[in-house]
Image: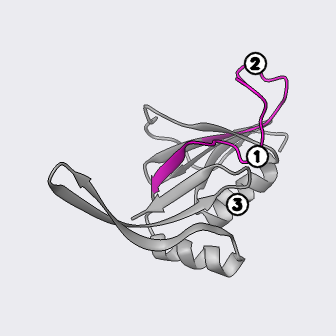
Amino acid sequence: MTENVSHVPVTEWAPLVPELMAGDLTHSLDVYTRVFGFTLHYTRPGFAYLSLGRVQWMLEQANPDKAWLTGPLERPCGRGINFQIVHPDLDALHARLLAEGYPLFAPLSTATYMEGDTPHTQRQVLVQDPDGYLLRFTD
């Protein structure tokens, strides 16, 4: 990935966009686009900007000299956090994960979370990305 590539213009920037360090950006981009279903908007050397529905996401090639690293990057990355991502077609994602033999951190299930007295029910499947970040895809 040595040149900028623009595939789909971003029409509105999200107010919060996670930027994850990737050990192998090319491999991570393949997984995020082909398996998870993200759209690649643009790249520049060592960087990619993606989206999935209204979710916006950045991946950056890990570099031990990066000024913003707060400590050593050790797998699994992102310990203590999971990213809940509403997926536009959870069934299609689940089918792709199974077809790829992609390891599931937690199988497709239904969960109910309470907001005061109001229950919210969603289906979800959890996977780790190639660097170990925990992604919780929901419908």
Which amino acid is tagged 2? Ala
Disc 1 packing (10 Å; few <14; some 14–19; many ≥20): few
Residue annotated with mark 3: 31
Range covered by the magenta-colored residues: 58-85
Give the position of the N terminus as an image quadrant.
Answer: top right
Q: Where is residue 67 in the image (x, y as percent from the top left)?
A: 75, 18
Q: Mark 1 points at which residue?
A: 75
Q: Is residue 33 toward the left or the right of residue 44 in the image?
A: left
The numbered mark at residue 101 is none
Of 33 and 81, the residue lying toward us: 81
Provide the secondary structure element on which disc 3 rests.
Answer: helix
Residue 46 pos. (x, y %):
79, 37
Residue 99 part of the magenta-drawn span: no
Q: Quadrant of the C terminus?
A: bottom left
Farthest residue to the left: give it.
117
At label 1, the amino acid type is Arg
x and y percent of residue 15 in the render? 43, 31
Secondary structure under tag 1 reads loop
What amino acid does circle 3 point to?
Val
User: Which residue appears at 43% of the width and 37% of the height?
Assistant: 12
Q: Of marks 3 and 2, which one's residue comes earlier in the chain?
A: 3
Q: Tag 3 or tag 1, which sits nearer the N-term?
A: 3
Q: How far apart are marks 2 and 1 (CA)?
A: 19 Å
Q: Is mark 2 on a helix, strand or loop?
A: loop
